[in-house]
Each structure stands twice: as structure tokens, then as C-alpha cells.
Image: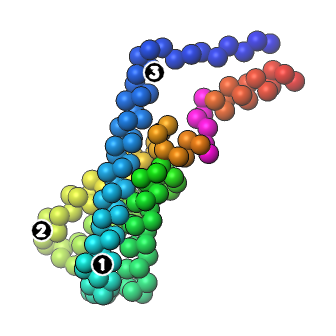
Amino acid sequence: MIVQVRRPGPLQVFLDGVRDVGLLVARVVVGLILVLRGWERWMSAGIDAQTAILEAAGMPTPNLLAWLVVAFEILGGVLLLFGLGTRLIGLGVAVLNVGTILLLDRLDPMNLTAWGWETNALLATLGVVLLCTGAGRTGLDALFLRPDDEQESELIAAEDRR
């Protein structure tokens, strides 16, 4: 049996390129924001300030949690810059920012907008986008993961050789 592999047309090639550039921009912006936020929490505000916020919200083991958030933001941000572990980091970004919105609501339920929840909502949304799409062809994830189309073509070809 002969397997025909369809080649994408010029419009599809263009749209794939636009998608990859868009994912690159989103990934780099979120990565930079994470690194800068983590660095600010660690070096400027200090872990003690983060621990105090978490303690005021009644979170368990606030010191450990503060260190975990800082480590995730710095290391996760660097990984996003290179496009490594993009889907997993995207999930972490979404969870962290939804958790932050809920934490801020717990600290001040009547005045949530004063805390700037919309930035966290936007970052959570971008985290979900990165979770769903991955890094695209511009990230280093592409070196380790093959696109679904290639896997399906190879499976069809392998079945036909039998």
C-alpha cells in the first residue's frame, strides 16, 4: 500500500510560522516576567516579606512555600526562555496565578481590584495557552518532541510495511 503524505500549502506554512512566532513572544514575555518577579521576591522584597504574606493568609508552611514559589518563578522562567518543559511550566504558571488571585481574595475580599488581580488573570491565561500549545517549533522542546502529524505518518508507513 502506498501512503501519501500531504504537504501543507503556502497559506498553512505562513500560518504555522505566525503561530510559532506568537508562541515565541508569549513564552519569552512570560519567562521574563517570571524571572523578574522571582528575583524581586528573593532579592528586593525578601523571603521574609513573602513568608509574612503567606502567613497572614493562613497558608501552611509559609516559609517553604515562599521558597518554592521563588524557585519556580526563577527556574521556570529560565526554562520558558529556552522553551524547555513549556507545557509543564505553563501548568505551573496557571496554578500559581490562580492561587495568587484566591490568596489575595482571602487577604482582602472586599477590595480585590486594588491588588491588581488582572495581571495574575492574564498570566494564568497565558499559562493555559502554553500548556495547551507547547513551545512551538522555536523552543528546545521541539528537539525532544515530534509533532503529531509526523508521528501519525510514521505509524501509517510502519503499518503498511507489515
| Residue type beneath disc 2 | Ala
| Residue type beneath disc 1 | Met
Disc 3 to disc 2, C-alpha distance: 44 Å
Q: Is residue 72 visible?
A: yes
Secondary structure beneath dot 2 equals: helix
- Left or right, 74 with reference to 110: right
Q: Quadrant of residue 37?
A: bottom left
Residue 150's x, y, as percent? 63, 29
Give the residues drawn in magenta, as a range: 144-149
Crowd rating for badge 3 (residues with CA inside 10 Å; few <14, some 14–19, many 20+): few
Q: Which mark is residue 19?
A: none
Q: Earlier in the sequence, mark 1 or mark 2?
A: 1
Residue 125's x, y, as percent? 33, 51
Residue drawn where x is 79% and y is 27% of the image? 158
In which quadrant of the rendered image does the C terminus lie?
A: top right
Q: Which residue is mark 3?
A: 13
Closest to the camera, between mark 1 and mark 3, is 1
Secondary structure beneath dot 1 equals: helix
Residue drawn where x is 29% and y is 82% of the image? 46
Q: Earlier in the sequence, mark 3 or mark 2?
A: 3
- Left or right, 84 with reference to 157: left
Q: Which residue is mark 1?
A: 43
Q: Which mark is residue 114?
A: 2
Residue drawn where x is 37% and y is 80% of the image? 66
Crowd rating for badge 1 (residues with CA inside 10 Å; few <14, some 14–19, many 20+): few
Residue 124's x, y, as percent? 33, 56
Disc 1 to disc 2, C-alpha distance: 24 Å
Nearer to me, 158 or 139: 139
In which quadrant of the rendered image does the N terminus lie?
A: top right
Q: Earlier in the sequence, mark 1 or mark 3?
A: 3
Q: Is residue 153 above or below residue 36?
A: above
Q: Is residue 50 visible?
A: no
